[in-house]
Image (spheres, grey):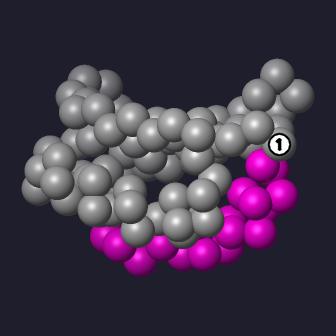
């Protein structure tokens, strides 16, 4: 099951993102369920959120993955959405 995780950072939290980025990237690489991932960018091309496509068994697995993301543990996100996604192209 493909799940799109769309997360928006809290205001003025770029420093939190940068401090936790190495652990977050390692988490992305090590869990074995990330199909695609990258930061969302604001109008000034600064990182302001995340888009992660997870390939997991079910929504519960996606919720568990999201809860254990170092960014989530650091309190970076103002909002996180997990949405079932159907890949059509790519």
Which residue is rendered at x = 78% and y = 49% of the image?
13
Task: State whether residue 32 is above or below residue 51.
Answer: below
Q: Quadrant of the C terminus?
A: top left
In the rendered structure, which segment of residues is drawn in magenta?
13-32
Task: State whether residue 60 is above or below residue 11.
Answer: below
Spot occupied by residue 83 in the image (x, y as percentages of width and height): 29, 32
Which residue is rendered at x = 25% and y = 24% of the image?
88
Residue position marked by numbered label 1 in the rendering: 12
Q: Is residue 62 left or right of residue 49?
A: left
- Residue 89, image quadrant: top left
Q: Is residue 71 visible?
A: yes
Q: Is residue 29 visible?
A: no
Q: Is residue 62 left or right of residue 69?
A: left
Which residue is rendered at x = 41% and y = 77% of the image?
30
Residue furthest to the left: 57
Asked whether 38 or 76 is in front, the reply is 76
Which residue is rendered at x = 68% and y = 41% of the image?
10
Q: Quadrant of the N terminus?
A: top left
Spot occupied by residue 19 in the image (x, y as percentages of width and height): 77, 69
Spot occupied by residue 73 in the image (x, y as percentages of width and height): 53, 66
Q: Main secondary structure of the magenta part?
A: helix
Spot occupied by residue 63 in the image (x, y as percentages of width and height): 28, 53
Residue furthest to the right: 44
Q: Is residue 25 magenta?
A: yes
Dot 1 crowding, Cα within 10 Å, few <14, some 14–19, many 20+: few
Q: Secondary structure at mark 1?
A: loop
- Residue 50, image quadrant: top right
Task: State whether residue 62 is above or below residue 20.
Answer: above
């Amino acid at each position: 099951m493909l799940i799109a995780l769309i997360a928006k950072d809290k205001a003025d939290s770029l420093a939190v993102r940068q401090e936790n980025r190495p652990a977050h990237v390692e988490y992305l690489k090590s869990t074995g369920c990330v199909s695609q991932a990258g930061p969302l960018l604001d109008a000034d091309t600064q990182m302001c959120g995340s888009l992660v496509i997870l390939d997991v068994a079910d929504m519960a697995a996606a919720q568990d993955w999201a809860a254990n993301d170092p960014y989530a543990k650091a309190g970076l996100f103002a909002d996180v959405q997990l949405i079932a996604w159907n890949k059509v192209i790519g």
